[in-house]
Image (cartoon, grey):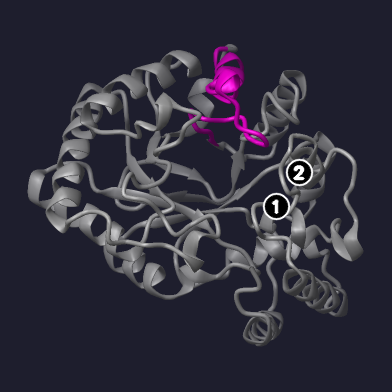
Amino acid sequence: MKRVKLGGSDVEVSEICLGTMTFGSQTSEADAHAQLDRALEIGLTFMDCAEMYPVNPVRRETVGGSEEILGRWLSKPGNRDRVEVATKVTGPSQMVRDGQGYDGAIIRKTIDASLRRLQTDRIDLYQLHWPVRGSWSFRQNWTYDSSGRSKQQVLDHMADVLEAMAEAVKSGKLRAFGLSNETAWGLTRWCDVADRTGGPRVAAIQNEYSLLYRLYDTDLAETANAEGVTLLAYSPLAAGLLSGKYQDGAMPEGSRAAVDKTHGGLGNLGGRKTARAQEAVAAYHSLAAEHGWDPVHLSVAWQLTRPFRNVPIIGATTGAQLDHLIEGFGKTPSEELCKAIDRLHREHGLPY
């Protein structure tokens, strides 16, 4: 598998990343470790986690569980030095620290807590899961209000956080710093503050990106290209929508939507499962079939054709799902197919 560098850092990773957010909920520890072994076999060495995982649902009593499962695998002889590990500190959430979010003082503690759970002495990429000022991600773009904090408050917060990050990098606990669910303005300001204070520059930004969700294509892509930041694209299958398993009202047993509904949720994949989204999925499936592509493989491979550096984060509840994803690695859609995808995007833009 090809290797890429994260931004201007010295962290080199596989061009595709394995997400671990279901480790400890929908994916047992044994299955999780089998997935990690399988990934390593084919050169997929980059693993992404977060302190609040597992998800679906997030529960106070399970916070940190995915890091612990990943940590027990990392502790096995030879594993840690063969992989790159990313994790995240949680933004304001009642499930973690009673909604306290993070500042420099908290981050000094959360880094050490993640290191203990991961059973390692270093984290290759440490990310802010979402901004403390709020975010338009997670379908909040329809109603997001950005008027809550003054510019100076935000800049002071960034300087405080970057001071803690700089200490952790200097001590060897962290190799690189990243963002998640950020805006173009936020990314620019983080880079500016880092340049002013000598803190670590942003190496990567982890935002949602898929055939169905392409908000990154405009302001963020331009900003990231100019600042030398790599996109870590989460939900490249739109939380499973692009697999087609939810078409025609289907709700497969054990699927993310079904599990969410079992735990009192709406089962709408965080607002992604809309009538317009299902129309778009049908169109992309038809296009994939016309060109002889598996739609799951096309959804991931297309991302690697984009005009900005990006690393798709795949996720698999089961080993069989991971094997299916792996079958598509190394394939590249033709220029003709990519142009056809752009035409469909114009017809089905922002379907959720």
Left or right of residue 191: residue 85 = right
Which residue does the image show at 43% across and 42% down from the upper left?
A: 129
Which quarter of the image is occupied by the C terminus? bottom right
- The picture places residue 348, in percent across and down from the top left corner, at 68, 81
Q: Which residue is mark 2?
A: 256
Q: For residue 24: magenta?
A: no
Which region shows up in magenta? 48-75
> Measured along the vertical axis of the image, is residue 164 above or below residue 286?
above
Residues at discs 1 and 2 in contact (Cβ within 8 Å): yes
Let me know if residue 79 appears in the view.
no
The CA span between labels 1 and 2 is 7 Å
The mark tally for this picture is 2
Q: Which mark is residue 269?
A: 1
Which residue does the image show at 59% across and 64% down from the upper left?
A: 303
Judged from the image, the secondary structure of the residue bearing numbered disc 1 is loop
Judged from the image, the secondary structure of the residue bearing numbered disc 2 is helix
Given residues 202 and 130, the one toward you in this image is: 130
Type of residue at label 2? Arg
Residue 212 figure quarter: bottom right
